[in-house]
Image (cartoon, coloured by chain):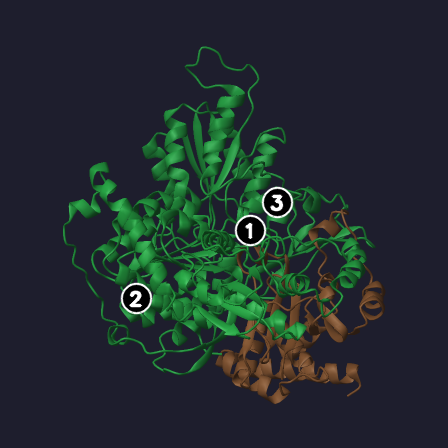
Chain colours: A green, B brown
């Protein structure tokens, strides 16, 4: 098991390795001689960016962690406009942020290959919705490739650059969690000389305002180019190596499987022991190549379309069939669920229903027996880590503002502050949304200075937003709140990394994949924008944090409190690497009165309740030594046991 | 071989993904087609975690279907129960015996089932076999609690019908861990093997 950052640069064509889908895509980009990569991290896309960042200097590729997906898109795009191969990566909702540029760029096209990797998250393992990026491809009329395995993800990445260059149009590479976060056997290909030598490639920008300036007069001419191009691509894709027909040629029934659904269909057919079907394996759900449909439908009497989430392929196939006078039954979302992720069970159930067969095992009996089990298994949702500075900040906010205050929050680990016992998150929408909502609630509930009338009862509003999220989309919202005379407290939970996606740097940390960048301090930004109150506190000092919150709440206007302390998970990882130790707390049972404040108000996962003794206890294997419990306990029952890496 | 399915469960931070990756490499290097399924991000923060390791000709998707796991390797007892619907009839559950009570249990909002109840459900309702071992204790005996996952992987290799040899898996681990940690990991692996042998009556 070698290190991924080594494997992706191995000069060993033909070697079989085990790679995560995201790592395989990084290798694909390197095999394709990528020059520029820019992204904002987002689960499940982040490992692609981290891998590119880790090999940037060695491979001679410019890699940046941009402040948001739109900026990342524009950075990478400009390289492609300059004739270089470039890539950006994001989670599905990241494309919403980049969409403003994305939707227009399809009119302008590219010079060098430009691949937009978008990782969808069906079942919302780490996301707020399960939107289907393939619809964006149709919206912008650009092709989308959808791999069925990690190896295919690597091969498709290379092909995506070629396709993009051939038609001078950007290409979406769409994965889902089960590709991005699935490991599979991948066969390495050749690395280009420039990557092996680490030679940086520079581009050339040829001025062409009619193409690169999007005034209406220029754009009107280009919309038809978009539509003509996608038809040419459709034609090309009927010969693409990722689309094929397999199975029984004379079969009367056919199954169309798009992307990863192909893997589930193969597994389901094998499990059912069925082989008299014809399969159309699609790696390009948009545009669906008509020439392949013609060949596939020949002789068929019934068709089932298996795809994850939206009926993107189904709608295209049905329109094509209608236009061509084909009237055989075509099934899809009437058999395959439209919500949550595809599984082998779902594929096997849909295909069994379609073919009039019984499922190979009795899933319903399993469900029935499992229903009793799920009733007695205690929930274990993710929680803020032991020693997480956000816990202390939330605890101080709630004490200072009271439970009647309203707490808009944002996207990050700290969204977990919604769970008991902290319950200091009342709303979240999307990146940067906390400040807009805080301001909007102030307008709706309180009214702002200068208005003819304001409400007599004032609600306290305290928003929380992470450091990376602040730079991502918090900035315009903060400017808006200050400009429009809001009266809100904005607490920036500054843990000095983009923690939830894997400790990436951001402007507040200042590091880049190519060495030190220029660090931007959040308090400087807040002061420059004209915030009425700005303070920096260390959340490991709960009393000081509480006092700062009290002062911030008193101020009329926009208060910004920066709660700065490095992410505990990141810090413990660093300490482990350096072989350093940290203090471990234990409960002095003579002092513990069993009041449960540490559990019912603070909620560190390392603290548990000993029901027999009626005392709190610390799991020493989970304590990371922040000492927050000792500050919260009114009886001084938490004491340092001595230090030691547990 | 058509397919072999391992489900690994536990609490985020216990080294589950590392264990899955190690097993995946061991299977790959034994010549199998491999899929490992995992979830990163929000789902990892001390919440319940499940990872899938699958190998064989018929393996395509990264997730083990319900009712198809040959073995569930649980790093925490109640996490074995949470995913028991994945176990095939006659499958084996190897569970670490140390409970980590969820915050909701400490708050009195939920209760933690007894070990007897867990065993009864696994063996009676799901027709599986349960063995439990104190993996942390064995890891400490080996020299570092961080090797708990290696103890459990050692135990896993003793599952009747497990297609990879203990020696092969051990060698993959030896080559994967930092040089200074080799001895403690090898010892942890052996302690896991020994414990499982005794429990399984091998």
**Chain of residue at mark 2:** A
Q: Are marks 1 and 2 on the same chain?
A: yes
**Chain of residue at mark 1:** A
* Circle 1 or circle 2, nearest the eye: 2
Q: Quick check: A175 left or right of A522? A: right
Q: Residues within 10 Å of mark 2 (few under 14, many from 20)?
A: some
User: Which residue is at a point 54% across and 42% down the rendered structure image?
Assistant: A393
Measure how far apart labels 1 and 3 are at the Cα level.
14 Å
**SS of the residue under disc 3:** helix
Measure how far apart labels 1 and 2 are at the Cα level.
46 Å
Residue at which label 2 appears: A162
The percent position of residue A464, horizontal first and vertical second, equals 50, 39
Q: Are marks 1 and 2 in contact (CB under 8 Å)?
A: no
The image shows residue B91, relative to residue A371, as above or below, that is below
Which numbered disc flags the more N-terminal residue, 1 or 3?
1
The residue closer to the viewer here, A153 or B41, is A153
**SS of the residue under disc 1:** loop
Q: Which mark is residue A388?
A: 1
The percent position of residue A547, horizontal first and vertical second, equals 53, 34
* Circle 3 or circle 2, nearest the eye: 2
The image shows residue A552, relative to residue B108, as above or below, that is above
Q: Are marks 3 and 2 on the same chain?
A: yes
Which numbered disc flags the more N-terminal residue, 3 or 2?
2
User: Which residue is at a point 52% across and 60% down the rendered structure image?
Assistant: A177
**Chain of residue at mark 3:** A
The percent position of residue B53, horizontal first and vertical second, equals 60, 73
**SS of the residue under disc 2:** helix
Residue B146 visible in the snapshot: no
Q: Residues within 10 Å of mark 3 (few under 14, many from 20)?
A: some
Q: How crowded is mark 1: few (under 14 residues within 10 Å), some or many (20 or more)?
A: many
Q: Do the residues labelled 1 and 3 touch (CB within 8 Å)?
A: no
């Amino acid at each position: 098991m070698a290190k991924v950052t080594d494997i992706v640069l191995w000069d060993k064509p033909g070697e079989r390795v085990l790679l995560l889908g995201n790592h395989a895509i990084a290798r694909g980009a390197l095999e394709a001689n990528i020059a520029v990569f820019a992204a904002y991290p987002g689960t499940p896309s982040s490992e692609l960016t981290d891998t590119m960042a880790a090999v940037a200097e060695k491979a001679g590729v410019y890699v940046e962690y941009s402040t948001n997906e739109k900026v990342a898109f524009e950075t990478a795009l400009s390289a492609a406009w300059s004739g270089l191969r470039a890539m950006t990566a994001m989670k599905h909702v990241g494309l919403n942020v980049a969409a403003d540029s994305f939707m227009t760029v399809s009119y302008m096209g590219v010079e060098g290959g430009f691949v937009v990797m978008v990782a969808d998250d069906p079942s919302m393992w780490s996301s707020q919705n399960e939107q289907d990026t393939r619809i964006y491809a149709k919206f912008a009329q650009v092709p989308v490739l959808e791999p069925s395995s990690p190896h295919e993800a690597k091969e498709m990445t290379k092909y995506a650059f070629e396709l993009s260059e051939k038609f001078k149009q950007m290409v979406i590479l769409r994965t889902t969690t089960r590709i991005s976060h699935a490991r599979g056997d991948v066969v390495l290909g050749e690395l280009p000389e420039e990557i092996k030598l680490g030679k940086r490639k520079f581009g050339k920008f040829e001025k062409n305002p009619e193409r690169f300036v999007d005034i209406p007069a220029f754009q009107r001419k280009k919309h038809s180019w978009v539509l003509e191009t996608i038809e040419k691509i459709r034609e090309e894709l009927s010969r693409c190596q990722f689309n094929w027909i397999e199975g029984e040629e004379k079969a009367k029934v056919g199954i169309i499987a798009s992307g990863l659904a192909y893997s589930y269909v193969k597994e389901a057919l094998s499990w059912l022991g069925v082989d008299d079907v014809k399969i159309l394996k699609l790696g390009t759900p948009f545009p669906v190549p008509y020439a392949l449909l013609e060949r596939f439908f020949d002789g068929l009497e019934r068709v089932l379309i298996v795809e994850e989430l939206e009926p993107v392929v189904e709608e295209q196939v049905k329109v094509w069939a209608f236009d061509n006078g084909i009237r055989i039954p075509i099934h899809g979302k009437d058999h395959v669920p439209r919500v949550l992720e595809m599984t082998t069970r779902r594929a096997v159930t849909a295909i069994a229903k379609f073919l009039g067969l019984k499922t190979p095992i009795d899933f319903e009996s399993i469900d029935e027996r499992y229903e009793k089990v799920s009733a007695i298994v205690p929930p274990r949702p993710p929680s803020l880590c032991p020693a997480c500075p956000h816990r202390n900040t939330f605890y101080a906010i709630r004490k200072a503002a009271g439970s009647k205050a309203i707490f808009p929050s944002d996207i990050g680990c700290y969204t977990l502050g919604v769970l008991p016992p902290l319950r200091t998150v009342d709303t979240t929408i999307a990146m940067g949304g906390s400040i807009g909502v805080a301001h909007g609630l102030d307008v709706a509930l309180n009214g702002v200075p200068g208005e003819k009338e304001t409400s007599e009862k004032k609600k306290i509003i305290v928003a929380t937003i992470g450091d990376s999220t602040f730079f991502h989309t918090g900035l315009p919202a903060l400017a808006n709140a200050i400009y429009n005379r809001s009266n809100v407290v904005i607490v920036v939970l500054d843990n000095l990394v983009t923690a939830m996606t894997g400790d990436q740097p951001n402007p507040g940390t200042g590091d880049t994949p190519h060495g030190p960048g220029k660090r931007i301090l959040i308090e400087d930004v807040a002061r420059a924008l004209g915030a009425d109150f700005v303070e920096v506190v260390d959340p490991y000092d709960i009393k000081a944090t509480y006092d700062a919150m009290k002062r911030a709440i008193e101020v009329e206007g926009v208060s910004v409190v920066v709660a700065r302390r490095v992410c505990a998970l990141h810090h413990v990882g660093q300490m482990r690497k350096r072989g350093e130790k940290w203090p471990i707390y234990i409960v002095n049972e003579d002092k513990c009165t069993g009041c449960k404040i540490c559990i019912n108000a603070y909620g560190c996962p390392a603290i548990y309740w000993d029901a027999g003794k009626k005392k709190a206890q610390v799991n020493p294997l989970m304590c990371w030594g922040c000492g927050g419990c000792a500050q919260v306990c009114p009886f001084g029952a938490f004491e340092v046991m001595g230090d030691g890496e547990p | 071989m058509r397919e072999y399915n391992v489900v690994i469960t536990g609490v985020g931070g216990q080294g589950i993904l590392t264990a899955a990756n190690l097993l995946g490499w061991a299977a790959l290097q034994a010549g199998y087609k491999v899929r490992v399924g995992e979830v990163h991000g929000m789902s990892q923060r001390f919440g319940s975690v499940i990872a899938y390791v699958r190998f064989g000709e018929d393996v395509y998707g990264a997730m083990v279907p319900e009712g198809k796991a040959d073995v569930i390797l649980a790093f925490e007892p109640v996490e074995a129960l949470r995913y028991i619907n994945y176990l095939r009839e006659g499958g084996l559950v190897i569970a670490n015996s140390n409970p980590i009570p969820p915050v909701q249990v400490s708050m009195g909002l939920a209760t933690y089932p007894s070990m007897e109840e867990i065993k009864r459900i696994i063996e009676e309702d799901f027709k599986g076999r349960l063995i439990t071992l104190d993996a942390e204790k064995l890891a400490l005996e080996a020299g570092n609690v961080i090797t708990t996952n290696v103890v459990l992987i050692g135990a896993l290799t003793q599952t009747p019908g497990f297609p990879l040899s203990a020696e092969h898996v051990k060698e993959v681990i030896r080559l994967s861990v930092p040089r200074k940690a080799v001895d403690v990991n090898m010892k942890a692996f052996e302690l896991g093997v020994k414990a499982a042998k005794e429990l399984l009556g091998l």
